[in-house]
Image: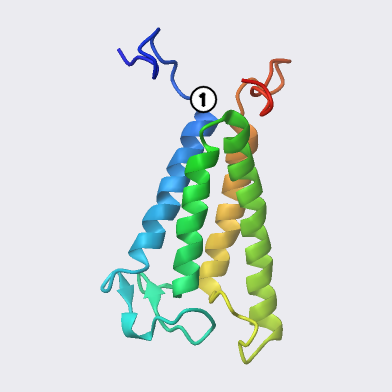
Amino acid sequence: MARDARGGRPAAPRPRVQQAALVAAALFLLIGVLGFIPGITTDYGQLRFAGHHSGAKLLGLFQVSILHNAVHLLFGLAGLVLARSIAGARLFLAGGGAIYLALWLYGLVVEGLDEAGGANFLPVNNADNWLHLALGFGMIALGLLLSNKVGTGGRLDTPFDRP
């Protein structure tokens, strides 16, 4: 049976919202790493730091750049840190979902208004847009629906200013 970090009583299983945040964070880290692997990322020779000129595509579908991959890695690291608490996990999932919905809107605007692609500094294509939409709604749903004790009158988490 698993024990807590101090070797005391058995450790309770992590709440589902924390588990979901850890899985999401791990997936973002994996995607960030895969974006730098030739073969998994097609046209790897066309990988640029940023901008619409990066012709590299993760899995031959999602347009990526060095900046795009770095954002995935940083997002994944932030998720690992935030998933240590219930409130942080909720923030990562719901807040991250809101960020991805904003990226979806950004992609639509860049695609619809900027024909030359100059504003597309974080290269996104149509496949990225659909993925960002699904990620946005999915992460928000997980952050809100998996919260521990929601609607029961119980505390969601220990406040940050108390041990």
User: Does 111 appear above or below 59?
Assistant: below
Where, quadrant-wise, is the N terminus in this rendering?
Answer: top left
Residue 64 in view here: no
Q: Identify the residue under disc 1.
A: 15
View extreme (bottom): residue: 116
Locate residue 33: give its quadrant. Answer: bottom left
Locate residue 130: give its quadrant. Answer: bottom right
User: Does 120 appear above or below 35?
Assistant: below
Q: Position of residue 122 (x, y in %)?
A: 56, 74
Name the residue located 68 percent from the left edge and 81 percent from the top edge: 112
User: Does 13 appear above or below 131?
Assistant: above
Name the residue located 39 percent from the left edge and 19 percent from the top edge: 5
Disc tally is 1
View extreme (left): residue: 39
Q: Judge left or right: residue 117 versus residue 31.
A: right
Q: How is the image coloured?
A: rainbow
Q: Judge left or right: residue 37 versus residue 109.
A: left
Residue type at mark 1 is Pro
Locate residue 30: give its quadrant. Answer: bottom left
User: Does 121 appear above or below 116?
Assistant: above
Residue 18 in view here: yes
Q: Position of residue 27 (x, y in %)?
A: 41, 50
Q: Position of residue 84 (x, y in %)?
A: 51, 33
In the image, 96 versus 81, the foreground residue is: 81
Name the residue located 35 percent from the left edge and 14 percent from the top edge: 3
User: Is the residue marked by circle 1 packed among few (<14), some (14-19), or many (20+) residues within 10 Å?
Assistant: some
Q: Position of residue 17 (x, y in %)?
A: 54, 32
Name the residue located 43 percent from the left edge and 41 percent from the top edge: 23
Where, quadrant-wise, is the C terminus in this rendering?
Answer: top right
Q: Name the secondary structure under disc 1.
A: loop
